[in-house]
Image (cartoon, grey):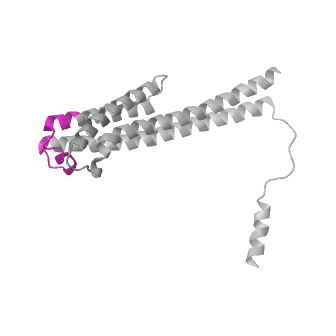
């Protein structure tokens, strides 16, 4: 009996089967496009802030580990693996370069200009340089340590993620611009 009652409720929630053949007038089209633009702008800002916050947290962790390396060198296990291979100041310098890469990502995500993507690409290339640096020293260790794989690929992954998010949000903004263009093209014909 409950199953039958549930099916009757679901039938009331179905979409209408008749088509409204009346086209939208110019004002309704304009309101709808403005609504889409406003929603897209809000969503874009929200997702940019979410991913920039994630990168900011990672950069904060990197700053903490740099300061810990300065105050008590080789205390952190992930840096202590490289004690025999690298000097402490090189580790600190590589950490600051990683913070720079994350900062470039954050600026690229939050800075609203036409050069947004260039900031993220600069971060990506900085991440590649860091990945080569860390992988060189990781491969020189007697045993490969998987627990420090985030050192070479952390900033690089952050830049890749920022590029992906920026691409998706730009693509959705382009779709809304196309919709506005179609609206005006329809008016002209």
Range drawn in magenta:
70-93
Q: Residue furthest bottom?
A: 1
Please tell me which residue lies in front, 180 or 73: 73
64 to the left or right of 127: left
Residue lying at 68% horizontally and 28% vertically, measured from the top left: 178
Residue 124 image position (x, y, % from top left): 39, 31
Q: Is 104 contained in the magenta span?
A: no
Classify 72 as above or below 183.
below
Classify 38 as above or below 82.
above
Residue 23 image position (x, y, % from top left): 84, 35
Please tell me which residue lies in front, 137 or 5: 137
Q: Is 76 contained in the magenta span?
A: yes
Residue lying at 32% horizontally and 45% vertically, measured from the top left: 150
Residue 101 image position (x, y, % from top left): 33, 33
Residue lying at 55% horizontally and 36% vertically, measured from the top left: 168
Please tell me which residue lies in front, 86 or 22: 86
Q: Residue furthest top?
A: 188
Residue lying at 50% horizontally and 41% vertically, measured from the top left: 46
Name the quadrant containing residue 94.
top left
């Amino acid at each position: 009996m409950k199953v039958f009652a549930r099916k009757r409720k679901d039938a009331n929630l179905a979409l209408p089967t008749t088509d409204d053949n009346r086209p939208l007038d110019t004002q309704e089209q304009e309101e709808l496009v403005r609504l889409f633009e406003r929603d897209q702008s809000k969503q874009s800002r929200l997702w940019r802030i979410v991913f920039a916050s994630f990168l900011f947290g990672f950069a904060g962790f990197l700053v903490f580990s740099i300061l810990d390396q300065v105050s008590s060198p080789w205390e952190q296990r992930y840096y202590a693996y490289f004690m025999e291979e690298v000097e402490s100041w090189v580790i600190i310098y590589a950490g600051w370069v990683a913070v720079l890469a994350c900062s470039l990502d954050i600026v690229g995500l939050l800075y609203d200009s036409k050069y947004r993507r260039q900031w993220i690409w600069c971060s990506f290339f900085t991440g590649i340089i860091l990945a080569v640096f860390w992988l060189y020293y990781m491969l020189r260790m007697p045993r490969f340590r998987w627990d420090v794989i985030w050192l070479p690929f952390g900033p690089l992954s952050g830049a890749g993620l920022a590029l992906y998010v920026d691409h998706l949000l730009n693509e959705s903004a382009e779709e809304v611009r196309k919709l506005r263009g179609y609206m005006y093209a329809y008016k002209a014909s």
